[in-house]
Amino acid sequence: MNSWFTVKVKYTKQLENGSFKRVSEPYLLAAMTFTDAEARIYEELGTTIRGEFQVTGIARTDLHDIFQYDDTETWFKCKVTYDRMDEEGEKAKTVSQNFLVSAANVKEAYERTVESLSTMMIDFVIASIVSSPIVEIFPYREEDVQSPAMKKIVVEDESEERTPVRAVFSASGSDFDDTEEEVFVADESEEDSTSELEDDFSNDEDE
């Protein structure tokens, strides 16, 4: 059964001005175990990153769904809360779930989250929206037959003015409801004390 993992990768990146800089960037992918996550990131990035790169950390990531639109590569993490009712219809507790949505800004992230959750039959509150440093996501693949981290919905509009296409990805095992994340960190003696990009998933606090 697959879950989401955030994998930090350190490598030498060529900047737009032609200079080179050592960076640490987080990627999000669906995998069954930490070992699978590490193997898949090497598979996915092996042909796109020039030179050597190193996996410096892997964290199991609490995400309920991912709403990916094809008009932007900027990501936001949205925390949604709602009241879960017990069998007698009385309020049991407030449940929190994290969603990842691609959007140009916070306002658009809010609107797209509301749109994506519009079919929910209960009232919900978007408690927080924070920018995510995630560079790219690698969701469910057809060959991963045991993986439920699959594309569920694709929405297109045939009108003259093009509407961004939305894809929704989900992985069971990611609905932890405020449980702590498991984290794997590579043993790297030369690792910098702080990386260029901070991954808000690997040390997420329940705001």
Image (cartoon, grey):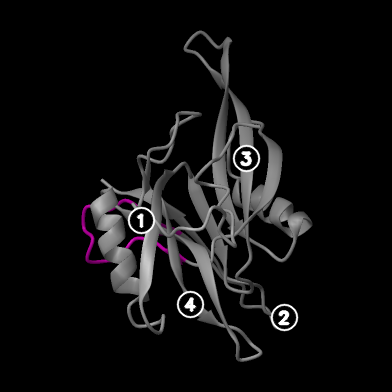
- Residue drawn at the location 29% of the way across and 50% of the way down: 34
Q: Earlier in the sequence, mark 4 or mark 1?
A: 4
Q: Which residue is mark 2?
A: 161
In the picture, which quadrant includes the N terminus? top left
For the residue carrying disc 3, how many other residues have a C-alpha within 10 Å: few (<14), some (14-19), or many (20+)?
many
What residue span does the magenta drawing correspond to? 137-152
Q: Secondary structure at mark 2?
A: loop
Q: CA distance from mark 4 to mark 1?
A: 25 Å
Q: Earlier in the sequence, mark 1 or mark 3?
A: 1
Q: Which residue is mark 3?
A: 79
52 lies left or right of 105: left
Quadrant location of residue 70?
A: bottom right
Look at the image and tell me whether residue 118 can be seen. no
Q: Is residue 96 magenta?
A: no
Q: Earlier in the sequence, mark 3 or mark 4?
A: 4
In front: mark 3 or mark 4? Answer: 4
Look at the image and tell me whether residue 104 can be seen. yes
Residue 88 vertical placement versus 19 (above, below): above
Q: Secondary structure at mark 4?
A: strand
Q: CA distance from mark 2 to mark 3?
A: 31 Å
Say which of 43 and 94 sits in front.
43
Residue 60 vertical placement versus 89 (above, below): below
Q: CA distance from mark 4 to mark 2?
A: 40 Å
Say which of 89 and 136 sits in front.
136
In the picture, which quadrant includes the C terminus? top right
The disc at residue 12 is: 4
Q: Earlier in the sequence, mark 2 or mark 3?
A: 3
Q: Secondary structure at mark 3?
A: strand
Q: Which residue is mark 1?
A: 30
Q: Earlier in the sequence, mark 4 or mark 2?
A: 4
